[in-house]
């Protein structure tokens, strides 16, 4: 799937007719959706089996967020939405966590925001939720949008 996504990205940079561009975009979006679904199914079965392992590594948080935003950028542009992010100045640039799981969660939240937002903004906000000690913190990630929302129960 990654090969298909990569090659369609390259194909989009070549001279194509509008119809061909539309086909390539559809292939890419469908491939990304299928890859996400496959990853979710694999993770769900790992969780059910009690075998999910986190891969803790140091990574640049800003790069992680920007790369995730890039994955939904074509759908955002297609719907003419505004996509932004804000990271509080207190949040470290480099963090230790599972970058793959974080990207997967953010992508899921952003994909839902794009799916249910027909006009307006989608914003990712990152801040410190709790300082545990000098080296450990909990980070809060919030994705807000101007979509239809979830109706109150009752």
Image (tube, rainbow, N blue to C red):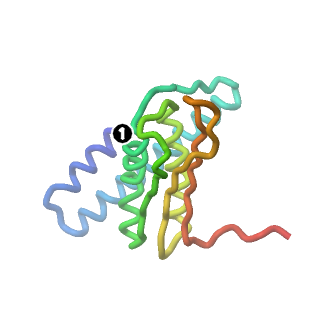
Q: Which residue is pictured at 57% across the width and 55% down the height?
A: 142
Q: Which residue is pictured at 48% across the width and 35% down the height?
A: 100
Mark 1 Cα shell of 10 Å, populated few (<14), some (14-19), many (≥20): few
Q: Which residue is pictured at 48% across the width and 74% down the height?
A: 120
- Extreme residue toward the left, this view: 15
Q: Is residue 39 above or below residue 24?
A: above
Please provide percent x and percent y for residue 69: 41, 53
Please provide percent x and percent y for residue 129: 62, 46
Q: Quadrant of residue 6?
A: top left
- Extreme residue toward the bottom, this view: 119
Please provide percent x and percent y for residue 98: 51, 32
Q: Which residue is mark 1?
A: 2
In this view, the residue in front, 13 or 67, is 67
Secondary element type, mark 1: helix
Q: Which residue is pictured at 53% across the width and 70% down the height?
A: 117
Q: Quadrant of the C terminus?
A: bottom right
């Amino acid at each position: 799937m990654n090969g298909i996504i990569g090659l369609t990205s390259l194909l989009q940079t070549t001279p194509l007719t509008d119809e061909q561009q539309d086909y390539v975009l559809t292939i890419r979006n469908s491939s990304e959706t299928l890859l996400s679904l496959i990853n979710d199914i694999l993770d769900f079965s790992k969780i059910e089996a009690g075998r999910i392992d986190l891969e803790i590594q140091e990574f640049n948080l800003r790069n992680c967020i920007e790369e995730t935003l890039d994955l939904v950028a074509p759908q955002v542009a297609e719907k003419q939405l505004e996509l932004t992010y804000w990271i509080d100045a207190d949040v470290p640039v480099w963090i230790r966590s599972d970058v793959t799981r974080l990207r997967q969660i953010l992508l899921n939240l952003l994909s839902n925001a794009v799916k249910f937002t027909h006009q307006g903004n989608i914003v990712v906000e990152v801040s410190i939720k709790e300082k545990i000690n000098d080296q450990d913190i909990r980070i809060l990630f919030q994705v807000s949008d101007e979509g239809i929302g979830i109706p109150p129960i009752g």
